[in-house]
Image (cartoon, grey):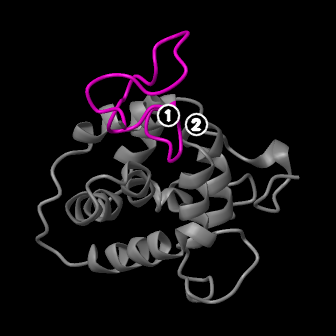
Amino acid sequence: MARSGVPEAQVPYVTSVLELMELLRADPDDRGLRTAALLRRSHPFDKELQIAGLVHRLGHLLRLSDGTVTVGVAAESIRPLLGERVARLVRLQSPERPHPDSDDDDGDGDDTEAVATLCQARDAATAAGLDAGVLEDWQPLLELVAAGSCRVGSPGNAIDPLGAPRGSKGPSGPYRAR
């Protein structure tokens, strides 16, 4: 059974960035695009938060065989492609969930503020007239996150995106700690 509570065989996993882009193009009101644009402006360095904003409405686009639409299924469907944190943010931002600051045992510890920020951006994105750009602008970032390049706590980061060279014992380059 998947974390969403839906049997593993019924979860419609998204297996590639191209497949995800096709699903996102089907969103009639571009609210995910507007949410992501707001998050890009307010949190330019948190790429996973921006992607969670982009895909948070995926539950409305995915349907189980019985017609059920859930945020849990959406989060589970993107987890293998976009990672645990993006899936957790999508799952925790659901309007049906208790307030993001409430105590729950989902293990969101460090992401409580990110979930609250995502919820605020999601709610603000309902306003008409917000220039959010085009979906194709997000494909490179989706590919980076899918490749694991922007994972929080990964060896590659904004200071040294390639990580340490093979065989070295620590960070290298002009930005290493001295």
Q: Is residue 42 left or right of residue 110?
A: left
Which residues make up the magenta segment?
Answer: 148-177
* Badge 2: residue crowd in 10 Å (few <14, some 14–19, many ≥20): many
Q: Residue at (72%, 71%) from the top-left corner?
A: 106
User: Can I make out residue 141 in this image?
Assistant: yes
Does the stretch in magenta take in 163? yes
Q: Which mark is residue 81?
A: 2
Q: Residue at (81%, 52%) from the top-left corner?
A: 2
Depth check: give the residue in front, 92 or 31.
92
| Vertical arrangement, residue 129 with respect to residue 17, above or below | below
User: Can I make out residue 63 in this image?
Assistant: no
Task: Give how far across and how far down residue 102 sits, in percent.
Answer: 62, 89
| Vertical arrangement, residue 178 with respect to residue 8, above or below | above
Task: Give how far across and how far down residue 21 sits, in percent.
Answer: 40, 38
Q: Secondary structure at mark 2?
A: helix
Farthest-out residue, top: 167
* Badge 1: residue crowd in 10 Å (few <14, some 14–19, many ≥20): many
Q: Residue 22 is drawn in which quadrant?
A: top left
- Residue that label 1 marks: 146
Q: Give the position of the C terminus as an image quadrant.
A: top left
Q: Earlier in the sequence, mark 1 or mark 2?
A: 2
